[in-house]
Each structure stands twice: as C-alpha cells, then as structure tokens.
Amino acid sequence: MAASPHTKTRATAGHNPLRILLALSALPALGLAVLVGTARSPLRAVGPVEVPVINGNLGPCSADFTVTDASSKPIYDAKIHVTILYGFMNKRKQDLEIGTNSDGKARLEGLPDKLKKPPLEFVVRSGDLNKTVPHDPAVDCHANFSVTLGAK
C-alpha cells in the first residue's frame, strides 16, 4: 500500500533529539529549585542554645561565664582557660579550657572547694583580647562572671 498524499508521516522514528536536549537542560534548574526550597525551610527549631560544660572532677564548685565585647554583644568561641594545682605539695596539675557558645556562655564544673594556693586564675581570650579573672572557690563556690573583652 502506498501512502496517500494527505497522510502525515514522521521524519524520524523514535524520540526527537531536540526534545531530549531541552528536557536534559531543564534538570539543573529543577535541582536548584529543590535546593532553594530546602534552604528556606528551618533546619532546627528556634530555642535556647545549649551551654557548653567541662568538668574537672576535683570538687563540688562551678563557675559560669558570660563573655561579651565592648558593645555588649556575646562573643562566640571565646576561650576560657584555668590551670588547677592540687595534691601533695601541688604536684598535680590539671588544665581546663572551654569555648563559649553563640550566647557567649560557658560553664566549668567540678572545681575544688579548697585550694592550698588561692586564687584560681581564669584567662578569658578571644583573638588578641584577653582578661584574667581571679577566683577563690572557698569564698564563692558557685560563681557567675560577666567578662567584657575590649573594654578599658
């Protein structure tokens, strides 16, 4: 049978290469749309930020720190360091260091309540700024410190 002159025939059998190319070029745009949609959704619920804690296991005392800059903004990852000497003739030594959270807060637990050579000296630093905070746990076993770095 011969095809009649009024019958439409396809020029190529199978899929149209131009259509496939257009479909493939749309895939990166689709992937980007999915990523943007995901980025707009919250990753975690907004709530209080957990305060980092380090435990020296040397006693019942603690020290809570809030570290801010000169404009009263909390400093993230300000380092708080203390060296504790203890034992016979203070021959034992323990170094503790912790960084603050995004609210500028950190907590040291398990500090001794009695020292042969008080006070403890907490060194708080962030970048080039630092400040030393003396503390005698026999006077205040559960101390709270507000430290401002960069203030005169």
Image (tube, rainbow, N blue to C red):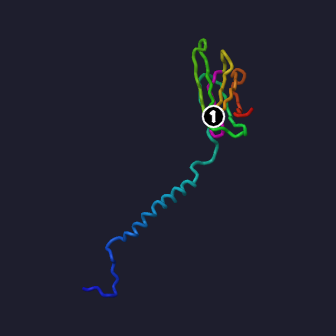
Q: What residue span does the magenta drawing correspond to?
A: 101-112
Residue under label 1: 127
Residue closer to the observer: 37 or 48: 37
Q: Residue furthest right?
A: 152
The foreground one among 56 and 67 is: 67
Q: Residue at x 39, y 70 (%)?
A: 18
Q: Name the image quarter holding residue 82.
A: top right
User: Does the magenta segment cover residue 136?
Assistant: no
How many circles with numbers are drawn on the protein?
1
- Residue at the far bottom: name it: 5
Label 1: how many Cα within 10 Å (few below 14, some 14–19, many 20+): few
Residue at figure coordinates x 58%, y 52% from the top left: 42
Residue 87 is situated, as x and y percent measured from the top left of the image, at 59, 15
Q: Secondary structure at mark 1?
A: loop
Q: Which of 150/49 is in front?
A: 150
Residue 29 in percent (x, y) is at 49, 61
Q: Is residue 18 above or below residue 77?
A: below
The residue at the point 60 percent across, 12 percent down is: 89
The part of the image, by quadrant, that contains residue 70 is top right
Q: Quadrant of the C terminus?
A: top right
Q: Is residue 136 above or below residue 2?
A: above
Residue at position x 68%, y 20% in the image? 119
Q: Nearer the viewer, residue 35 or 139?
A: 35
Q: Position of residue 146 (x, y in %)?
A: 71, 33
The correct choice, above or below, for 11 with respect to 17 in the image is: below
Q: Is residue 111 above or below residue 10?
A: above
The percent position of residue 136, horizontal first and vertical second, equals 70, 21
| Quadrant of res 4 | bottom left
